[in-house]
Image: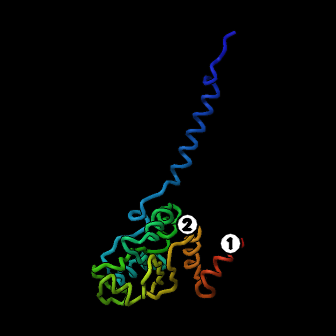
């Protein structure tokens, strides 16, 4: 009677199938660069971007106020904004633009006024700490603002849902978050 080596036959086939399944299941969830997949490109005319948001059927514009050396901005980009589910949800509902709170690049606010990015951040929206996520409706009105990094991708998703569902009209984000946690 001939002995079969333990790697032959069905064991090897099963291992190959398991390995293939693991590879396929992780490929779809791989993080994507937020600069390419989360943020939109802009020439810095936010009044024009509002018009574009209306034309594309978005619910508004999201500005992420950030600065280069901000560890919390970096954390958001490497742990939350790089997640495909986050990117897909937010890109469906918003045009999304980064704003450097130390930037000298000229932009135009939602009313068409020209100013530097740092003046837009500080003088128009009193942004001093980063990141700040500022959500604007299609008329350019600030409807929700979140300062700091969220705890995780789920909390950031809840923030997006909070704005999309217009829950800011009847409750705070903290109350909405408690509702979601209780579910």
**Nearer to me, 75 or 160:** 75
Note whether 11 is above or below 22 in the view shown.
above
Residue 27 screen position, x and y as percent: 51, 49
Give SS at disc 1.
Answer: helix
Residue 19 to residue 10: above or below: below
Task: Reply above or below: 125 against 165.
Answer: below
Q: Position of residue 164 (x, y in %)?
A: 55, 77
Q: Residues within 10 Å of mark 1 (few under 14, many from 20)?
A: few
Give the labeled residue for mark 2: 153
Do the residues bearing badges 2 and 1 touch, measured as CB atoms within 8 Å?
no
Query: Is the residue marked by circle 2 packed among few (<14), some (14-19), or many (20+) residues within 10 Å?
Result: some
Decide which of tag 2 and tag 1 comes sooner along the chain.
2
Quarter holding the N terminus?
Answer: top right
Viewer-side residue, 157 vs 50: 157
Q: Position of residue 21 (x, y in %)?
A: 58, 42
- Dot 1 corresponds to which residue? 181
């Amino acid at each position: 009677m001939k002995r079969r080596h333990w790697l032959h036959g069905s064991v090897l086939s099963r291992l190959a199938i398991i390995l293939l399944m693991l590879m396929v299941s992780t490929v779809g969830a791989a993080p994507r660069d937020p600069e390419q997949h989360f943020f939109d490109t802009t020439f810095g005319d936010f009044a024009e971007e509002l018009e574009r948001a209306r034309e594309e059927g978005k619910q508004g514009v999201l500005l992420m106020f950030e600065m280069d050396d901000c560890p919390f901005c970096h954390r958001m980009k490497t742990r939350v904004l790089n997640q495909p589910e986050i990117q897909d949800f937010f890109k469906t509902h918003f045009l999304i633009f980064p704003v450097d709170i130390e930037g000298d690049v000229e932009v135009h606010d939602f009313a068409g006024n020209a100013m530097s990015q740092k003046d837009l951040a500080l003088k128009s929206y009193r942004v001093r700490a980063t990141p700040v996520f500022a959500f604007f409706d299609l008329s350019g009105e600030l409807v929700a603002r979140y300062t700091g990094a969220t705890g995780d991708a789920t909390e950031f998703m809840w923030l997006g849902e909070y704005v999309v569902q217009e829950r800011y009209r009847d409750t705070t984000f903290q109350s909405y978050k408690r509702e979601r946690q209780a579910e």
